[in-house]
Amino acid sequence: MTAPAHASAALTLQPPVSERQRLTTAVKRLARSHGLSVSAVTDATALHDVLPILRDRIDRGHLAGLDWFTHQRAAESCDPAVLLSAAQSILSVGIAYWGADEGKPDDGIPRGRISRYARGVDYHRLLPDRMRSLHADIERLVEHPVEARFLTDHARIVDRAVAARAGLGWYGKNACLIVPGHGSWVMLGELLLDLDLEPDHPINQTCGHCQICLDRCPTGAIVAPYTVHAPSCISFQTIEQRGAIPRDVRQAVGDWVFGCDVCQDVCPYTGAARPEPDPAFLPGRIEHAYPSLPFLLTMSEQTFRDVFRGTAITRAKREGLARNAAVALGNLGTDQGLPHLIRALLGHDRPLVRGHAAWALGQIGGGMARKALAVAWTRERNAGARSEIALALETDSGPSDASVTWI
């Protein structure tokens, strides 16, 4: 008896699941159980197509200030075998961290703004800890030792390129990796494994004609699609910059004191992210999200360590946060910041901070600011700070007959 045609058409034969596929599925399931929100696999072959792009970025000065990232370092970061010669697969993982944010508290205190990724536990510690635990479970799963390396944003490997090849996400024009369901609010890590896993496929997705991130970048640092000029980037200037923030960038910094989220905030894909933050990324105190600018400007080294210990914010160091706070107070431009800036101008132990306090006072202007700058000019001995004071006095050409209360 012949089966009806519609019955045979409904039958679809699925290829049998291989042991390699079963193992890959089990590893991804373990990754989720260890708090790694997303994961995908690629092979451990070199990223030959990425190296010319990195070399071009270096040659064009887009990575100026990151002097350690040389052509040789770029070549090494594109070849996983440099890190683990036995590597067969790379498990690209990530932790999602976007959640609701009520914004600055309305408490009358001038406050700065910290990038979302840095408000909780330092991801440089969090991701490796979870990857190590995952690795231990993988070894238990396969019942034999597995060689591995754990990487997290240390430029030992081009993590976004690995994640894109693995299909974890795709490149946005802001050069961030956009992960379906989470936007770019995902911190990335990689496990190089001596284990043969089934590679995933890259995601065939682009930003199309949208370039809102280019248009809304406060400093114009996204100079072309997928290309960020690091020296103009607020994140670079508030974190990696150890010297003075360039004067032509300071006003655009706004109230950011650590990092910048603007190109992520305005992205339509990122705006659709699910509010499922990993609890470890939530701020433990208000200073980890919206710190008081006077507090940052005046805190001691010990206070800095006590308040920000265990967060990525320590990367900017006490001097850098105080410098950034001075710039933010100048940009807020209210008289409320004057007493704090004057104290910093006349008494901070770091000339870099005194110089930026001078700039901020020049931005605010008025008699009190001018008189403080004039006094500082007679006291300051550091050449860099004196230059900032002189320029601030030129910036504020208003009357100087206001009285000053010295504190």
Image (spheres, rainbow, N blue to C red):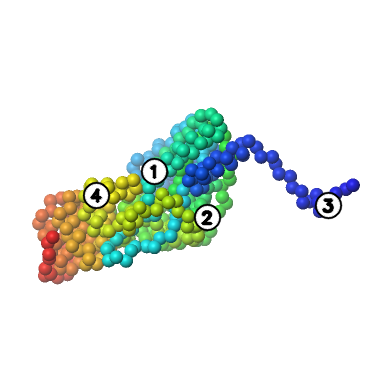
User: Which residue is found at the position 55% from the left and 43% from the top?
Assistant: 29
Give the CA distance from mark 4 to mark 2: 38 Å
User: Which residue is found at the position 23% from the left and 47% from the top?
Assistant: 301
Residue 310 x, y percent position in the rendering: 34, 45
Question: What residue is pinned by disc 1?
Answer: 124
Q: Judging from the image, what secondary structure is the residue with disc 3 in?
A: helix
Mark found first going from the N terminus, 1 or 3:
3
Q: Judging from the image, what secondary structure is the residue with disc 1 in?
A: helix
Q: Residues within 10 Å of mark 3 (few under 14, many from 20)?
A: few
Question: What residue is pinned by disc 4?
Answer: 303
Mark found first going from the N terminus, 1 or 2:
1
From what the image shows, is residue 68 above or below residue 295? above
Viewer-nearest of discs 3 and 4 = 4
Q: Amino acid at mark 2?
A: Gly
Question: What residue is pinned by disc 3?
Answer: 5
Mark found first going from the N terminus, 4 or 2:
2
Splitting the image into 4 quarters, where does residue 378 fall? Answer: bottom left
Give the CA distance from mark 1 to mark 4: 22 Å
As drawn, is 315 to the left or to the right of 196?
left
Question: What residue is pinned by disc 2?
Answer: 181
Q: Residues within 10 Å of mark 1 (few under 14, many from 20)?
A: some
Residue 61 x, y percent position in the rendering: 37, 48
As drawn, is 42 to the left or to the right of 305?
right
> 92 and 241: which one is in front?
92
Q: Amino acid at mark 4?
A: Thr
